[in-house]
Amino acid sequence: MGEVAGKVDYKIEPEKKEALIDASNWPLLLKNYDKLNIRTSHFTPLPMGNSPYSRNLEEYLKYGIINLDKPSNPSSHEVVSWIRKILRCEKTGHSGTLDPKVTGVLLVCLNRATRLVKSQQESGKEYVCVCKLHSKPKSLEEVKIVLNNFQGAIFQRPPLICAVKRQLRVRTIYDSKLLDYDDANNICVFWVKCQAGTYIRTLCEHIGLLLGVGAHMQELRRVKSGNMTEYDNMCTLHDILDAQYIYDTTGDETYLRKIITPLEKLLINFPRIVIKDSAVNAICYGAKLTIPGVLRFDNNIDINSEIVLMTTKGEAVALAIAQMTSTVIATVDHGIVSLTKRVIMDRDTYDVKWGFGNRSMEKKKLILAGLLDKYGKPNEKTPLSWIKSEGYTPKLIGNSSNYTLDSDITTNNNNSNNCNSSIKDNNAKDTSQEKMNPDGTNSTFNLTNNENIKKKDNELVGGNGNNADQQSESGVVKKKRKKN
């Protein structure tokens, strides 16, 4: 047996195995799920929740967005108001205002998806602009050079047509490119990728100033907002009206589902953390995410970066601020992973999975019995054993005290009794010493040193007149000069 074991070479060699699951074609937040770092694979799946595309129509509208091709002339606010009336939604919002004459991508968020409006308004935008030059420039190359000069941080002041305060602002142009130029009509068409809040109308005026010919914006179209382009399920107002009419008359949901996209589409570029089903409802109530609730996570998580918390079914739960990097999440066994910034999912979509421990059950019984208030805080009926275990420090003085600790009061009484007895003993000693000296020489026995000095000083000064000695408080005796 020993000879056989000696001949076999036991070692682990590196090997390459393909993943059992290919998640590259999975939708929305579940894409490349197999490439996420695994914290643990042990959790109890709950039957609540649905995959974003499997929601019923009511939930689909509740967590939906519309990539609208805004028409020219109506304002963004008017368009969003019309959609709210057509779809009979409670709330609608958009991802960034477009001027009335501007067309293109306008993201309209429905109901719960309006919680993502703020994050989408701050995302980058892309435009295609038609700029009219007031006279002919020197050459086409000069137009390209001037357009390339407007990259990076630039100063802008809002144009007169905008209903905002006209103060100087700094905006960033990430990239720009000249698409076409009409030499006969002095018209150029360019594409620009810029920060949110950039005024293309002002940019056209600056291009004209730098060319020395003057210019103004003739047409503008937004082609991308955030990660939604004009090729991502874009629809018009007529499409929305027709889809709702078909559903009302025939009950066919197909067309409504075509024009509405789950809100998870807006979050696919965020770093992801997959959480356990038992932790979902706690996050919906605003709790912090800790290590035991993490299943999988992305590589590119940094401290204070904005992340999305998602379920194993691909539903977005909340936006959060990371408190750990990916490396730390993989190595520690306790701690706070993220702080909840914006809750997306409705409360109680998943079952409550906290408050089932022994301590929590005891607390619920005390609340029902009236021994704690409705918030679980102590009142005047709270038993002493509960207060001590909770670690409260009650106020024992004043009218604001709600309860008292019998043991502390007993201790204080014992201490005060001991102090009183010691004081009585000292008084008895003093009276016995006074009785031993009936001539009164011991009358200053209980005075302090300073009082003794002062008394002697008064006796010397008052008794001998000019020959009296003056004694200071420090004990130094000085002779008084004789007065002539």
Image (cartoon, rainbow, N blue to C red):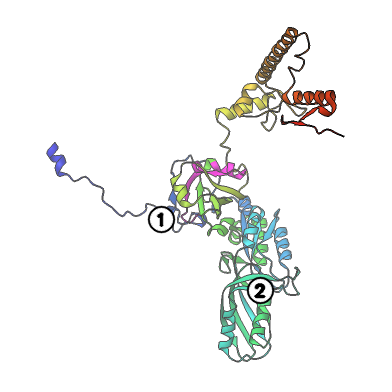
**Which residue is pictured at 65% across the width and 54% down the height?**
115
On residue 4, the disc is none
| Camera-side residue of 194 and 414 | 414
Q: Is residue 288 magenta?
A: yes
Rendering quarter of residue 3:
top left
Residue highlighted by disc 1: 22
> Which residue occupies 59% across, 83% down?
146
Q: In the picture provided, is 49 more to the left or to the right than 111?
A: left
Tell me the residue at 42%/53% (across/down): 34
Please identify the quadrant where the N terminus is shown: top left
Q: Position of residue 303 (x, y in %)?
A: 53, 53
Q: Of label 1 and label 2, which has the lower sequence position? A: 1
Residue that extends furthest to the right in the rendered view of this protein: 484
Note whether 107 is above or below 413 in the view shown: below
Q: Indicate the amino acid at tag 2.
A: Phe
Residue 199 in the image: above or below residue 28: below
- The quadrant in which the C terminus is found is top right
First to last magenta residue range: 279-301
Q: Position of residue 267 (x, y in %)?
A: 56, 57
The quadrant where residue 18 appears: bottom left
Q: Amino acid at mark 1?
A: Asp
Q: Label for residue 155? A: 2
Q: Would you call the spot at circle 2 few (<14 residues within 10 Å), some (14-19), or many (20 or more)?
A: few
Q: Is residue 179 left or right of residue 18?
A: right
At mark 2, the secondary structure is strand
User: Which of the two residues, 80 or 240, is positioned nearer the viewer here?
Assistant: 80
